[in-house]
Amino acid sequence: IRTMDFSDAVLTLKDNTKIKISDNSMIYLDFNEKQFKINMENGTISAERGDESEPNSTIKIQSGDKFIEMGIGATKISKGEDENLSIK
C-alpha cells in the first residue's frame, strides 16, 4: 500500500485493530491467523489494538533488520529519508 501527498489510508482488521498509513508512506502486508506482519519501506504508520484483539496474535512491524512485535496497545513509527526509525 502506498500513499502520496495529501493522502492517507486506514485499515481495520477483523479484530478491530486499526492501522493508519500517513501520506507519502509505503508498506507491504503479510498475515495469517496468528500474526500480521507489516514491512515498512518509508513514511509513518500508527497501529492501535484494543482489548478485543486476539490475545495470542501479534503485529510485527519491520523495517530493514529492525522490528517491533506488538500485542495490545498503540504505537506510531516513522522512517525518514535518513533511514532512521522513530517509535512513539
Image: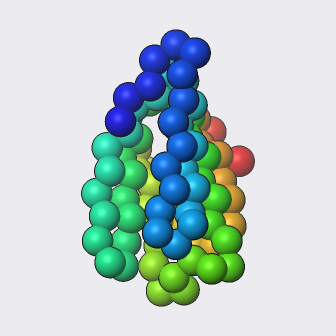
Residue pushed farthest top? 5
Residue 65 seen? no
Give the residue displayed 46% in from the left and 17% down from the top: 4
Give the residue displayed 64% in from the left and 59% down from the top: 48
> For residue 52, what is the image quadrant?
bottom right
Left or right: 27 in relation to 74: left
Give the residue displayed 47% in from the left and 62% down from the top: 13
Residue 18 percent coordinates (x, y): 57, 56
Colour mapping: rainbow
Q: Determine whether 14 is above or below 67 in the image.
A: below
Residue 7 percent coordinates (x, y): 54, 22
Q: Determine whether 42 is above or below 50 in the image.
A: above
Left or right: 61 in relation to 7: left
Quadrant containing the N terminus is top left
Residue 15 seen? yes
Left or right: 18 in relation to 31: right
Q: Determine whether 76 is above or below 42 in the image.
A: below
Residue 62 percent coordinates (x, y): 40, 51
Query: How many labels were placed on the picture?
Result: 0
Residue 73 percent coordinates (x, y): 68, 67
